Image (tube, helix red, strand yellow):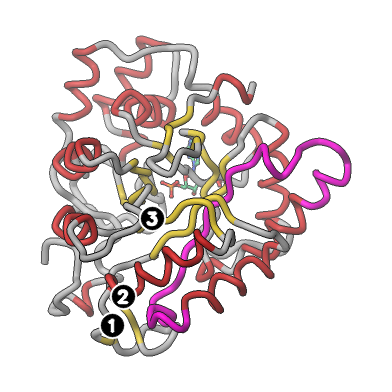
């Protein structure tokens, strides 16, 4: 099944599978490890984590077990993790990366992302600092040269911030990827087009609106129950979740839906045997309202010059 998942060729020359497993949020012990094992055995090759998710260690153990059992090789996997905002000072970047590698018990990660453009004094984000993400970026480039990471990128950056990196003095490596929220209510078309034009791949997180933490206006239907999406799904014999993922694949970005449930993991992988028509793609795009699910948690820093979103 794995060879059915298309890849995006990154500007670093490496290929990133377009479907990955998201592993944010709190989990019961072994929950994420079990999900990773189930996912890899059904063909997932990209696993998305972050230092702040606290799932790196369990993911590392699960992958090691699969490797030991001969079910997968490290080089067949694409592992993504992210540096948190309390480690943006250039001299903290390599130690932070090494901590993640140690937790994952890996020699390298495939993609290392700056999690958010704003830096903080501490991991609880009690207070932002003025550390410039351009300085963090220079330190990220050194990780590539040291072989600790294969590709580097960012997350939650807007187009102006990407452009600022692209235009920085002495840029050695362009961002290979920007991981941002993309949902039917937040299509992010301008950002996607800007990134495509500049050779930066995009990954969409939270494709289903992370049910449970949805801040969309109360009268707006949840994505998975949206009548337009349900009706499109009926035409193809697919669920709303599958329509949302397929819409993303056809728009050219990677997706990292989270699930710990084996049947939903399988369902989310089963999106490569149908194609949405032009009309259905348009109908999906017409649902865009600019509503951001992951908004309120970031609002305390809305006056910071590096705050990436509309206020
Ligand atoms: P579960 O882990 O029980 O499958 P997002 O990736 O947008 O953050 O959404 C993750 C949430 O969506 C999780 O609560 C997950 O629950 C649920 N989910 C994942 N896949 C599906 C699916 N195919 N259908 C319905 N809900 C899903």
Q: Which mark is residue 153?
A: 3
Q: Are marks 2 and 1 in contact (CB under 8 Å)?
A: yes
Secondary structure under tag 1 reads loop
Q: Are marks 2 and 3 in contact (CB under 8 Å)?
A: no
Occupied quadrant, residue 38? top right
Occupied quadrant, residue 194? top left
Camera-side residue of 262 and 205? 205
Residue matched to label 2: 135
Precedes in sequence: disc 2 or disc 3: 2
Residue matched to label 1: 131
Between the C-alphas of marks 2 and 3, the distance is 14 Å
Camera-side residue of 136 and 127? 136
Between the C-alphas of marks 3 and 1, the distance is 17 Å
Callout in the foreground (2, 1): 2
Callout in the foreground (2, 3): 2
Residue 175, relative to residue 120: is it above or below?
Answer: above
Q: Is residue 40 magenta?
A: no
Write down the region rendered in magenta.
Answer: 64-92
Residue at far right of view:
69
* Residue 117 makes an appearance in the image: yes
Residue 304 in picture, x, y percent from top left: 16, 79
Q: Is residue 77 magenta?
A: yes
Residue 269 in picture, x, y percent from top left: 55, 28
| Quarter occupied by the C terminus | bottom left
Q: Residues within 10 Å of mark 1 (few under 14, many from 20)?
A: many
Residue 296, relative to residue 278: is it above or below?
Answer: below
Q: Residues within 10 Å of mark 2 (few under 14, many from 20)?
A: some
Camera-side residue of 13 and 112? 13
Occupied quadrant, residue 213? bottom left
């Amino acid at each position: 099944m794995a060879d059915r998942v298309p890849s995006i060729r990154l500007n670093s020359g490496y290929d990133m599978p377009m479907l990955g497993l998201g592993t944010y949020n709190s989990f019961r012990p072994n929950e994420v490890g079990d999900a990773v094992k189930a996912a890899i055995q059904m063909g997932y090759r990209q696993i998305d984590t972050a230092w702040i998710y606290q799932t790196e260690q369990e993911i590392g153990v699960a992958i090691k077990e699969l490797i030991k059992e001969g079910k997968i090789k490290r080089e067949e996997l694409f592992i993504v993790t992210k540096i948190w905002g309390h480690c943006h000072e250039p001299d903290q970047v390599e130690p932070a990366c090494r901590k993640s590698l140690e937790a994952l018990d890996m020699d390298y990660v495939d993609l290392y992302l700056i999690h958010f453009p704003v830096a903080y004094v501490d991991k609880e984000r009690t207070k932002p600092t003025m550390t410039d993400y351009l300085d963090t970026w220079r330190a990220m480039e050194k990780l590539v040269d040291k072989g600790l990471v294969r590709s580097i990128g960012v997350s939650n950056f807007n187009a102006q911030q990407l452009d600022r990196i692209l235009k920085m003095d002495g840029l050695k490596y362009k961002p290979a990827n920007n991981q941002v929220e993309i949902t039917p209510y937040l299509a992010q078309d301008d950002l996607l087009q800007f990134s495509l034009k500049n050779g930066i791949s995009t990954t969409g997180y939270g494709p289903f609106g992370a049910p449970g933490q949805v801040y969309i206006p109360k009268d707006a239907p949840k994505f998975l129950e949206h009548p337009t999406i349900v009706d499109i799904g009926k035409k193809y014999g697919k669920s709303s979740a599958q329509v949302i993922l397929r819409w993303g694949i056809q728009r050219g970005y990677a997706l990292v839906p989270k699930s710990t449930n084996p049947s939903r993991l399988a369902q989310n992988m089963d999106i490569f045997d149908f194609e949405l028509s032009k009309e259905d793609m348009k109908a999906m795009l017409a649902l865009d309202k600019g509503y951001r699910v992951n908004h309120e948690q970031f609002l305390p820093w809305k006056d910071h010059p590096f705050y990436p979103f509309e206020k």
